[in-house]
Image (tube, rainbow, N blue to C red):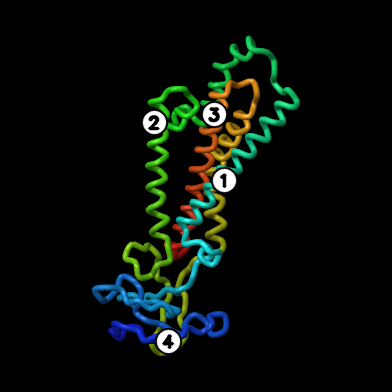
Amino acid sequence: LQLQSNRITKMPTIPRLNDNIYGQSTFVTDCGVPSAFDEALECENCTMCCNEDDDCYPQEETKVVKWGLKGYGTFAAVLSACFIALCCMVAFLLYITARCRNIGNTGTSEMMRSIKKVDMYALSKIGKDSVYSYFVTDKVFGWFIASATLGIQVGILVFFILASEANLQNDRTDIQFTWQCPRDTDVCDDKSDETPFGWICFSLLMFAFLSKDMINGSKLIYHSAKITHSFKSRIRYFVGGTCLCSITLFALYVSTVYNKAIATSN
């Protein structure tokens, strides 16, 4: 049933057929954006939504929705919480192991002499020119600047997540409608030139640019478990390493879902 490009403003209640059996072209309407109407056509059972340019896109649940989550934003929050919990667990286990083995317990005087060297090591891992380097210092104003920067970065990335959500009736979505539903056939076709090779190149680029931050953040987390450091120093190193790893993973996640939404070619 293909009803696109006919100015119908209200859809009757028609049951949706099984996509796995009948495909994605069984119920096509003008429920996409930008819409030819003042408000986009609502059609919950449609399998394909077309916009005013006759470009279409399948209306289907994303994988995260099928997993029981609300959308990409909810999945990002759950993923971040799990990662932070994992970092806490790893740091705690490393600390307990070092405590049991008495690793690095060389005395208070030597520990005090090595504080400056330890801080320089932490700064080298997080980057002296990085605003996150304030996390490994004991300056309150520096922590405020680093926290504010982290919040701004997360806020900007959230906008890209919202634009990646598969809500085809929302004008704020950046999803590219790459399907065509010709009037002389009852089968819609995806005109996207995207191939697995493009995603392989994307993965390699992300690894090249982000792996250094992940490795250095992980080293800081490991560094925070050493018993030679004071409690405050361990907290600073752990927070710095966790923030560096978290924002790196978050940037990777957002880049992946956003590129999936907007990519039309390699």
Could you say whether the residue bearing mark 3 is in a helix, strand or loop? Answer: helix
> Which residue type carries mark 1?
Phe
Reply above or below: 62 against 139.
below
Comparing 202 with 13, the one in front is 13
Residue denoted by label 3: 235
Q: In the rendered image, which residue does mark 1 sit on?
A: 83
Crowd class of label 4 (few under 14; some 14 to 19; many from 20; radius 10 Å): few
Contact, mark 2 vs mark 4 (Cβ under 8 Å): no
Q: Identify the residue at horizontal 43%, vertical 75% (top origin).
A: 179
**Mark-to-mark CA distance, 1 and 2:** 23 Å
* Residue 147 x/y as whole percent: 41, 35
- Going 44% across and 62% down the picture, which residue do you hit? 261
> Considering the numbered disc 1 on the image, is that residue within a helix, a strand or a loop?
helix
Q: Position of residue 6 (x, y in %)?
A: 30, 86
Of the two numbered discs 4 and 3 on the same chain, state the one appearing first in sequence. Answer: 4
Quadrant of the rendering where the N terminus is positioned: bottom left
Residue position for label 4: 14
The Cα atoms of the two marked residues, 1 and 4, are separated by 43 Å
Q: Amino acid at mark 2?
A: Phe
Of the residues under marks 1 and 2, which one precedes in the sequence? 1
At horizontal 27% and vertical 73% (from top left) the residue drawn is: 39
